[in-house]
Amino acid sequence: MSSAIPAASSQASSAGAKRVFDALRACKPDFFTLLKTERQVFGPVQIQVFDDPENALHGADAQSQYWSAVTFGQPVDADGFHLLRFFQRREVIAGKPDNYRWAFQVDESLTDVRQRVEERYGVELVRPWIMGAWGVAPEVGPEEQGGISTLLKIAGYDGGTTTITCELEAKDIGDFRMPEAVEVFGRPEIGVPPLKDTDGLMKALLACGPEFFTRLKEERASFGESEVFERRSSIMPAASQSKRKTPSSAATIVVFPAPIEVWGIAVTGYTQRADVVDRKRQLTFGFQTRSGRDQLAKVLRLRTGAQPVEGDRWELDLTTEDTGYAPSSSFKIADGLLTCATPADGAEPDPSTLFLVAKS
C-alpha cells in the first residue's frame, strides 16, 4: 500500500470534519454513520482496495485480511488536525469477522499529535512498551479519559505522519458490519474505482467460461483507459508436417495504465490469443501479472483449496469442492500469467469492447 501523501497544500475545513474527527475518539461503530453523513467535507477522493496475498479461505484456522485506503484530494482541516487519508481493515477468521480497524492519517508528527491531543482533551497518553502506540491507560477512570476510548491508538507513520486508530474485536460489537469504503464515500472522483466484485471476477476466470468476459465488461471502468496492441503471426511447419497443418495465431495484449490489485496479485494487463491448427481454433485468454509461478500457485492454493500438480492439473481438497473456487482443468498458471485455453466455438470477444481504450 502506497504511503505517499497528497501534494496539494490547500486545505478544506468545516465543522463537519471536526465532528467526524471528534467521533473517532469514542471508537464506536456508529462512527461510520456520521462519516457517511459528512462525506462531502472530504471532497474528491481516491479509493484503493487491497487483499492480503496470504489470505486463506478454507480450514478451521483460515485467516484473511482486507483493507482500504481513501486518499483525500487535498488535506482536510479538522480543527487543526490535517487529515490526509482514511484507512479501514477487517480481519476474518474461519469465515467469521474477528476484528475491525479504522484510522485517519494525520499530516503532523507523532510528538505534535500526541501533545495536541493531551492538551485539547485534558488527558495523559501512555505507551505501554517502548515501540508501542500511545493511548489512554486502561486503568484510568472515565472522568479522566477526556472522551477517548482505551481502544484508540496513536502511532507514527511513513513520511513523518501519524495514524490515529481504533481497533475493535467483533465479539465486542455484536452484529456490526463494517461498510465498504465505496458505500461510505461513493464512487471515487480521483483515479479508477475499485473492482465491484473481485471474487466474482476471479471465480469466472478460474471456471474458464464465457461469464469471465461478461465480468470484464462490468468491471471495465476499474481497469482504466488501457493500451491495446495486436499481433498476428504465422509459424512455418516442421519438415514432417503437412502444409495444411500450418498454425497461425492472432494475439492481443491489453496494458493497464496501472497495476490492479486482485487477490493480492498485481495484475498488469490482459492477454488473448486465437490459434488455428488442423482447422481447429483454440482461444487462450487471461491476466498478465508481476508474480512468478510459485507465488501465483501459493495465492491460488490458499484461496481455492486446490493446487497445481504435474501435467497442469489441479488437485482439489474435497472439503472445498462446493466453494465455487475450484479451477477448471483448462486453467493454467505460468510466470506472470493466469490463463485459460479453451476451444473457440464461435466469434472471439473483441478486447477493445471489454476494456476502455486509451485515446491515441
Image (tube, grey):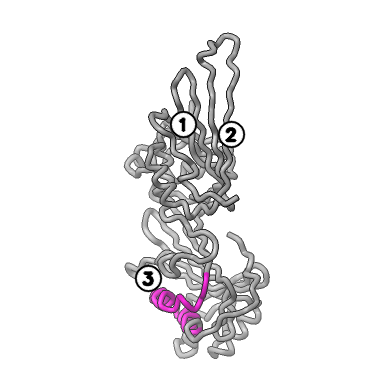
Q: Which residue is mark 3?
A: 172
- Pinpoint residue 162: horizontal percent, then vertical percent: 61, 74
Seen as rendered, the residue at the extreme front is: 360
As shown in the figure, which amino acid type bears the numbered disc 1? Answer: Leu
Separation of disc 2 and disc 1 at Cα? Answer: 15 Å
Q: Is residue 189 magenta?
A: no
Decide which of tag 3 and tag 2 comes sooner along the chain: 3
As shown in the figure, which amino acid type bears the numbered disc 2? Answer: Arg
Q: Which residue is mark 2?
A: 231
In percent of the image, x 44 and y 47: which residue is there?
A: 216
Q: Is residue 97 above or below residue 296?
A: below
Q: Is residue 158 above or below residue 37?
A: above
Judge from the rendering whether residue 303 lies leftward or rightward of residue 319; answer left or right: right
* Mark 3 burial class by Cα count in 10 Å: few <14, some 14-19, many 20+: few
Q: Is residue 14 above or below residue 333?
A: below
Separation of disc 1 and disc 3 at Cα? Answer: 51 Å
Quadrant in which residue 181 is drawn: bottom left
Judge from the rendering whether residue 15 lies leftward or rightward of residue 37; answer left or right: right
- Pinpoint residue 194: horizontal percent, then vertical percent: 48, 58
Q: Nearer the viewer, residue 63 or 88?
A: 88
In percent of the image, x 49 and y 24: which residue is there?
A: 276
Q: Nearer the viewer, mark 1 or mark 3?
A: 1
The answer to whether residue 5 is visible is: yes
Which secondary structure, mark 3? helix
Which secondary structure, mark 1? strand
Quadrant in which residue 171 is drawn: bottom left
* Mark 1 burial class by Cα count in 10 Å: few <14, some 14-19, many 20+: many
Q: Is residue 38 above or below residue 172?
A: below
As shown in the figure, which amino acid type bears the numbered disc 3? Answer: Asp
Which residues lie in the magenta part? 18-44
Q: Main secondary structure of the magenta part?
A: helix
Q: Which residue is mark 1?
A: 283
